[in-house]
Amino acid sequence: MHPIPYPANETVWRPAHIHLLISHADHRGLITQLYLKGDPYLETDPSASSTLAVNRILAISENSRQETMLKFDVVMSNEVKPEAGLYERLAGTYSMSDKSLIEFYPKDDLFFLKWNGQIREGVSYRGNYEFSGGVDNRTTAKFELLDNDRVNIKLHYFAVAPKHEINLVGFKAFRYNQ
């Protein structure tokens, strides 16, 4: 079974790819995509044509039982751990300057961004209330902790199809009760 290319919109096609989410308690989580060598859409796809994707474009081979396989080595970096309770303080729904709602919620060591109901990104903690992820770590979220449990955010989002960048500011409008 092989993945196949699909249209991202009317003019852009995504190459065949496999999504991976790998996590370990002592290491920074990894969300990535693997691509197949020879796919005609590799060069026009912003994620696949990124300089960081060169080691994720893999040749299909066969093992000793004539089964199709891909080989991808994973090296995980040490995790930058946030202070206790930080994810809980930041988690919630944010009202953004473009009138959209973005929910942030933790899963393992990643912080997921759900924009108007669609999961768009998993970002990793980088320290100083900043998170990044996505293509070349170009999606960034910088949180500002205020008094009375208020939180503001500056979000720089890099969309891959069609390729464009969005800068938004917002505030936590709803928080989760424990």
Image (tube, rainbow, N blue to C red):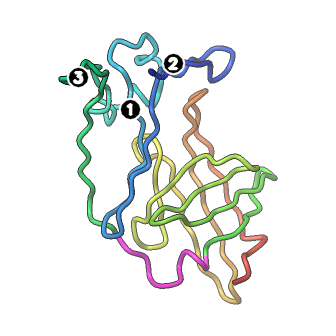
Q: Which residue is mark 1?
A: 34
Task: Say whether residue 84 is magenta.
Answer: yes
**Residue 96 x/y as whole percent:** 74, 57
Q: Quadrant of the N terminus?
A: top left
Q: Is residue 28 above or below residue 58?
A: below
Percent x, y of residue 160: 55, 32
Q: Which residue lies under the disc numbered 3? A: 65
Determine whether, in the image, residue 38 is placed left or right of residue 115.
left
Tag 1–tag 3 contact (CB < 8 Å): no
Q: Along the horizontal axis of the image, is 115 left or right of 42?
A: right
Q: Which mark is residue 82?
A: none
Residue 99 colored in magenta in the image: no
Q: Amino acid at mark 1?
A: Leu
Q: Which structural element holds mark 3?
A: loop
Instruction: Give percent across and percent down for residue 168.
Output: 66, 53
Q: Which residues are magenta?
A: 80-89
| 1 or 3: tag closer to the N-terminus | 1
